[in-house]
């Protein structure tokens, strides 16, 4: 993993690099070949590491806020925002007479109700106001509902976790798509990731989606997929019977031959909540077809009251994929895990859509029913070998930390004792 230096050495981002914050982007030569620029690429926290390693994603975001250019725009869509220091940084960026950054924030209602002791929302409300017609504001989606979910479909959440910067640290059109909320648990218990890109079409697609979330016109909302060269954004909810992830997996060919010989596609998945039966059955089918499928998860579901099998049974069927469980419990036993996999990342290396490729999908999107059809969620596809390989190195680290690992016939792994989102 290489350390990259930003274009402006005096920026807070560059200072963080000097202090030891590693942005996991390739070397300058590789960046020129792959399109990954300085100050972009994957960023990971490490909940079982030092305090600085636990807060790597938070530190990256805080640095980008402090480096935001005067009169630039920051847009944030987040599920839980419980970090007063980051809230104050956003407030200061907006209220500073020299900077006057336009800051717009959309949160799930539970960001306030689930943690009433947090001062973050109050800080943002006082600095930004709540009038969404203005250039700066903080807004809340309705109680018990996402901003874009149809209320007739049932309870939903505004589960997005992305940050948009029009100009920061010498970069333009920055998108930070992450799995991390802003909370102590997100830093110290959860394995999270963030993918940083500086790309105008991708930034524009995310910005349009943010504006629709802020408008909260669920009647006019339509599921959107935005293609822009190396990146594809998928914006939810998708209130129909088609499964976006199942559609992605349908493009996988497990074995193929060319002039260099025989090849096998590898599919890796790091997933917090996995309860979509069709996706589980598809991954098991791919393993049987010759793919090498490797999964680390925190929670599935098991047989229901009618005896119908769940995703746990589908993944553990004969000939199914390799599976490991990584969840935590807060008991006094120091031999049990205090971490949980919270990323929602799919990695494919092999033949995809008829072409050899290395791809990553990451974001806020769990493989659950509500994440597909009800929640506000975003998923980012990255077509880049260097990014894929960096995520795979991270995956191996998480897999090696998995507990209870292969012996995952436990209530927590099977969803009998659900893992908390925060």
Image (tube, rainbow, N blue to C red):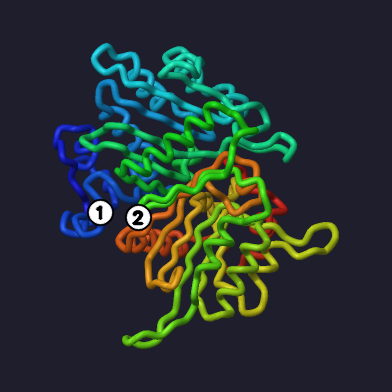
The single residue placed furthest to the right in the displayed view is 306
Residue in the picture at 42% in, 19% down: 136
Closer-to-camera residue (124/73): 73
Q: Which residue is mark 1?
A: 35
The x, y position of residue 200, in whole percent, is: 32, 41
Task: Say if 135 sits above or below 258 in the image.
Answer: above
The x, y position of residue 80, in whole percent, is: 53, 33
Label 2 near label 1: C-beta < 8 Å?
Answer: yes
Residue in the picture at 35% in, 36% down: 61
**Does dot 1 land on a helix, a strand or a loop?**
loop
Quadrant for the C terminus, please: top right
Task: Say if 135 sits above or below 57 in the image.
Answer: above
Quadrant for the N terminus, please: bottom left
- Camera sees residue 331: no
Q: Residues within 10 Å of mark 1 (few under 14, many from 20)?
A: some
**Does dot 2 land on a helix, a strand or a loop?**
loop
Q: Residues within 10 Å of mark 2 (few under 14, many from 20)?
A: some
Disc 1 or 2, which lies upstream in sequence? 1
Q: Which residue is mark 2?
A: 230
Measure the C-alpha gap from mark 1 to mark 2: 9 Å
- Quarter occupied by residue 304: bottom right
């Amino acid at each position: 993993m290489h350390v990259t230096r930003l274009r402006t050495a005096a920026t807070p981002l560059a200072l963080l690099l000097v202090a030891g914050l590693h942005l996991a982007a390739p070397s300058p030569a590789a960046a020129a070949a792959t399109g990954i620029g300085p100050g972009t690429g994957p960023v990971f926290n490490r909940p079982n590491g030092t305090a600085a390693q636990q807060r790597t994603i938070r530190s990256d975001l805080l640095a980008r806020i402090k480096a935001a250019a005067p009169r630039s725009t920051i847009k944030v869509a987040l599920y839980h925002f419980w970090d007063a220091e980051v809230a104050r940084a956003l407030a200061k960026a907006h209220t500073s007479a020299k900077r006057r950054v336009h800051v717009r924030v959309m949160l799930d209602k539970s960001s306030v109700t689930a943690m009433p002791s947090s001062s973050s929302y109050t800080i943002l409300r006082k600095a930004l106001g709540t009038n969404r017609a203005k250039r700066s504001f903080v807004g809340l989606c309705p109680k018990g509902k996402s901003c874009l979910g149809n209320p007739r479909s049932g309870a939903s959440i505004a589960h997005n976790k992305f940050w948009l910067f029009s100009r920061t640290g010498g970069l333009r059109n920055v998108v930070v798509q992450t799995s991390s909320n802003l909370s102590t648990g997100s830093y110290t218990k959860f394995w999270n990731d963030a993918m940083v890109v500086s790309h105008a079409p991708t930034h524009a697609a995310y910005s349009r989606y943010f504006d629709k979330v802020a408008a909260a016109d669920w009647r006019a909302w339509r599921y959107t997929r935005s293609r822009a060269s190396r990146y594809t954004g998928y914006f939810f909810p998708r209130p129909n019977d088609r499964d976006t992830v199942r559609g992605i997996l349908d493009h996988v060919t497990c074995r193929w031959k060319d002039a260099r010989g025989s090849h096998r596609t590898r599919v890796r998945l790091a997933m917090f909540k996995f309860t979509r039966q069709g996706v589980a059955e598809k991954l098991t089918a791919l393993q049987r077809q010759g793919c090498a499928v490797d999964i680390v998860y925190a929670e599935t579901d098991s047989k229901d009251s009618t005896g119908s099998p769940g995703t746990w049974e589908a993944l553990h069927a004969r000939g199914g994929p390799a599976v490991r469980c990584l969840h935590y419990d807060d008991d006094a036993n120091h031999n049990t895990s205090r971490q949980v996999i919270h990323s929602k990342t799919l990695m494919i290396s092999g033949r995809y859509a008829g072409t050899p490729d290395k791809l990553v999908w990451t974001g806020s999107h769990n493989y659950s029913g509500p994440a597909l059809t009800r929640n506000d969620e975003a998923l980012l596809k990255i077509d880049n070998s260097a990014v894929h390989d960096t995520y795979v190195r991270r995956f191996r680290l998480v897999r090696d930390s998995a507990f209870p690992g292969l012996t995952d016939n436990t209530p927590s792994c099977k969803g009998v004792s659900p893992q908390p989102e925060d």
